[in-house]
């Protein structure tokens, strides 16, 4: 279920306001939805806060996912890729496909050399 956020393009104003302008309406007056301005916040922090809110608002409207939901998807996909690329069969297939059989022979030789421990 989609969040009922203010629809439109989120933009920063120099005053610290975050304004949403209706999409496809040129010269429209934006709707103020937040302010990041404060006497106690440096201007660099104010602009960073604006950027964060604007990016989250505009991104949500494109994919209907909050930043925390995007992070969860990223972590899930990363875990799946880690599983895929730690599989020796898949690794061998990718090596052979992109680098030829010689890379597999070189890799096997390196593994053999690394497995030999010096006798002491």
Image: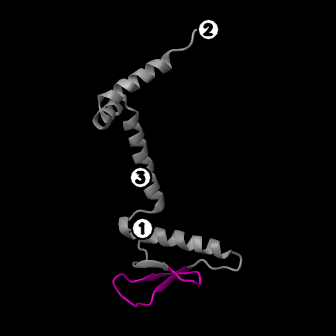
- Residues under labels 1 and 3: Cα distance? 15 Å
Quarter of the image with the N terminus in it: bottom left
Please check the rendered image and state whether residue 24 is part of the magenta-colored stretch, yes or no.
yes
Specify start and end residues of the magenta stretch as a single range: 12-34
Query: Going by the image, does 37 lie left or right of 7?
Result: right
Q: Residue at x 62, y 8 (%)?
A: 120
Q: Quadrant of residue 63?
A: bottom left
Q: Residue at x 44, y 18 (%)?
A: 112
Say which residue label 3 marks: 73
- Residues under labels 2 and 3: Cα distance? 50 Å
Q: Is residue 56 above or below residue 69?
A: below
Q: Residue 77: image x %, image y %?
A: 39, 47
State the SS at label 1: helix
Q: Residue 101: image x %, image y %?
A: 30, 28
Q: Residue 83: image x %, image y %?
A: 40, 37
Of the two numbered discs 1 and 3 on the same chain, state the one appearing first in sequence: 1
Q: Is residue 55 above or below residue 26?
A: above
For the residue pair 3 and 31, the one nearer the viewer reads as 31
State the SS at label 3: helix
State the SS at label 2: loop
Q: Which label is found at residue 59?
A: 1
Of the two numbered discs 2 and 1 on the same chain, state the one appearing first in sequence: 1
Answer whether labels 1 and 3 touch (C-beta < 8 Å).
no
Foreground mark, 2 or 1, reads 2
Say which residue label 2 marks: 120
Q: Residue at x 53, y 68 (%)?
A: 52
Q: Residue furthest right?
A: 40
Q: Is residue 44 above or below residue 20?
A: above
């Amino acid at each position: 279920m989609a969040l009922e956020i203010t629809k439109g393009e989120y933009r920063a104003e120099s005053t610290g306001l975050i304004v949403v302008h209706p999409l496809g309406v040129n010269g429209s007056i934006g709707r103020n939805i937040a302010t990041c301005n404060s006497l106690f916040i440096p201007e660099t922090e104010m602009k960073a806060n604006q950027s964060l809110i604007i990016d989250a608002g505009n991104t949500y409207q494109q994919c209907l996912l909050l930043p925390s939901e995007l992070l969860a998807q990223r972590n899930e996909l990363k875990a799946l890729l880690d599983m895929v690329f730690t599989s020796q069969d898949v690794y061998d297939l990718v090596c052979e496909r992109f680098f030829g059989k010689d890379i597999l022979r070189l890799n096997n030789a390196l593994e053999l050399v690394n497995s030999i421990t010096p006798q002491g």
